[in-house]
Image (spheres, rainbow, N blue to C red):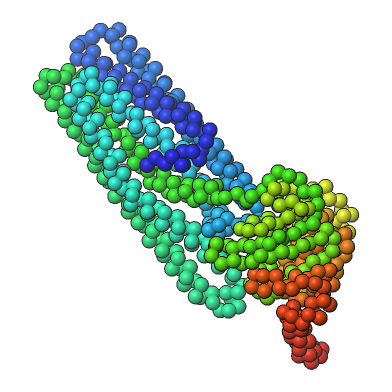
Amino acid sequence: MFDKELIKLIGGNRKYVAYTVLLMVLGMLANVGVTASVCAAVYLLSEGSAPSGYILPAATAAVSLLVRYIASRCTGDLKDMLGRKVKKDLRERTYDKILKLGVRSTDGMSMAGLTQVSMEGIEQLDLYYSAYLPQFFFSMLAPFLLFFICVGIDWRTALVLLACVPLIPLSIVAVSKYAKKIFARYWGKYTSMGDAFLDSVQGLKELKIFKADAARHAKMNASAEEFRKITMKVLVMQLASTTIMDLVAFGGAGLGVAFSVWGAMSGRLAPAQALFLILVAAEFFLPLRSLGSAFHVAMNGASAGKKIISLLQAEDPVWGDKEVTGTRLALEDVTFSYDCKRDVLKGVTMEFPQTGMTAIVGESGCGKSTVVNLLIGARHPQRGKVTVGGEDIENVSRESYYSRLASVSYNTYIFNDTVRANFRLAKEDVTDEEMREALRKVDLLGFIEENGGFDKVISEDADNISGGQKQRLALAVNLVADKDIYVFDEATSNIDIESEGIIMRNVREMSREKSVIVISHRLANVVPADRIYYMEAGGLKESGTHAQLMEKRGGYAGLYLAQKSLEEGYKAYAAPLAGEAL
């Protein structure tokens, strides 16, 4: 199995494959030299030669053994170097690709699948490149080199040995079609089980609350059982193909031995010549037999390699090289579809001034989050354009654009590191005073100082602070970044009223000097906005200030009054309960 795409994947490291093959050939020739020396000594012994006659065979054997030892050591070192370089290069390319994709997710690959492919998948490719690939080229060369060595001694035996050699590749080819399907399914089940496991661990609290953990347990057992079955199929396939290759290899070598013995008995070959052919017969088949053993590892690595190639070939986001000269954002007659079948946005035009607060509201599914994805460059429209400072963002450099823009959402990630380290992600040279000021604005300074200060470690997924504190810390980090454009995508979703009020107070203060874009399901938060865009079914239906939209008595007014009525009803219901609790 030889895959050109996988060969291209290693780029400049191909030279190490060539060096390894040359060393393997040198080692084989040295081995033949040892065999020839032994046969020469046997011949001299049968002829009753003087002791001085053994000097040349002994010296040849010694030199051959030394060359073989050096070649073997260098081959091992080169394979190790090749594996390490390939892993390093592939991990760098994979990581760089993920960085290029940026805020856009990798299509068709979950986080668990991406982790498995970029970690264990690359480990499997290490064996493909360091073990299988050199063996593949060596196995193609070795039988022909041995044939040219043996054909001068006895062309019949040499021809028989060479004719039997292709039976091993034929058996590999026969197995490969079935093996490709098996290994593709194997990796599919492997990544699927990883996804299910990660999903179950992350949602363990919800599973316990809804008493669905037993059902999830059964589902995980079923997934594990499917993976066990496909693993058993892989092992059965490997055992069967190994048995076939052993029969071919030992059968071919046995046939060569038989022809050598027949030649010696018929007087066609001298005993020493027959012995040489007998000893060399196995060398015809050992390289291809080793290739067959490496084949199964190669198939596993190739399946992982296809997924890595798919990731590396994913289309990069469209960016240019111009510098951003202004911060006024706009959508101009934008139409967008995720699947090219149904338009999520339909001819939307919006403007976001350099200063002030602009809000985008509407019922769930109206297209608010899609607008955010377009504004932050995660997606690009099929028709129309998104501009910054009058320039299409596809023409500006991503570095320049992101140096002006910050995005805070309901799931903004806080890293499992110290508070100080999280601030340094936004501003590398941030001072203690700047951190204090940012934390003071979001009412977190006291909490941080009482719980370890700036060296307090935030646990994974910010589990050691509340949801409201996490959102306020995310806001503080972004305040330190001091960007020109701030996008708040449901930043107050699922947090307490106190934290919501603190965040919205900071949003309003920022809007005096920055361009602030707010997407919120709670319309009370957007009442102070300088302009509100109300969306329905992917289209822009209304725009204006809160007062102007209320006067229109359209969709926005209806949604606002409905929310207000529900909130007041809830307060009226909750007040007596709170009194009873007291």
Q: Position of residue 23 (x, y in %)?
A: 43, 26
Rendered view: 133 above or below 109: above
Could you tell me which residue is drawn at 49 percent across and 42 percent down?
126
Could you tell me which residue is drawn at 41 percent across and 57 percent down?
185
Tell me the quadrant of the picture where the C terminus can be found: bottom right
Q: Position of residue 1 (x, y in %)?
A: 37, 42
197 lies left or right of 472: left
Q: How many marks?
A: 0
Q: Residue furthest left?
A: 266
**Residue 321 vs residue 383, the one in the foreground:** 383
108 lies left or right of 35: right
Q: Is residue 532 visible?
A: yes
Q: Quadrant of residue 29?
A: top left
Q: Quadrant of residue 385?
A: bottom right
224 lies left or right of 409: left
Q: Is residue 416 visible?
A: no
Could you tell me which residue is drawn at 48 percent across and 68 percent down?
220
Could you tell me which residue is drawn at 77 percent across and 82 percent down?
553
Q: Position of residue 494 (x, y in %)?
A: 72, 73
Q: Position of residue 260 (x, y in %)?
A: 18, 26
**Residue 308 vs residue 78, the one in the foreground:** 308
Rendered view: 91 above or below 489: above
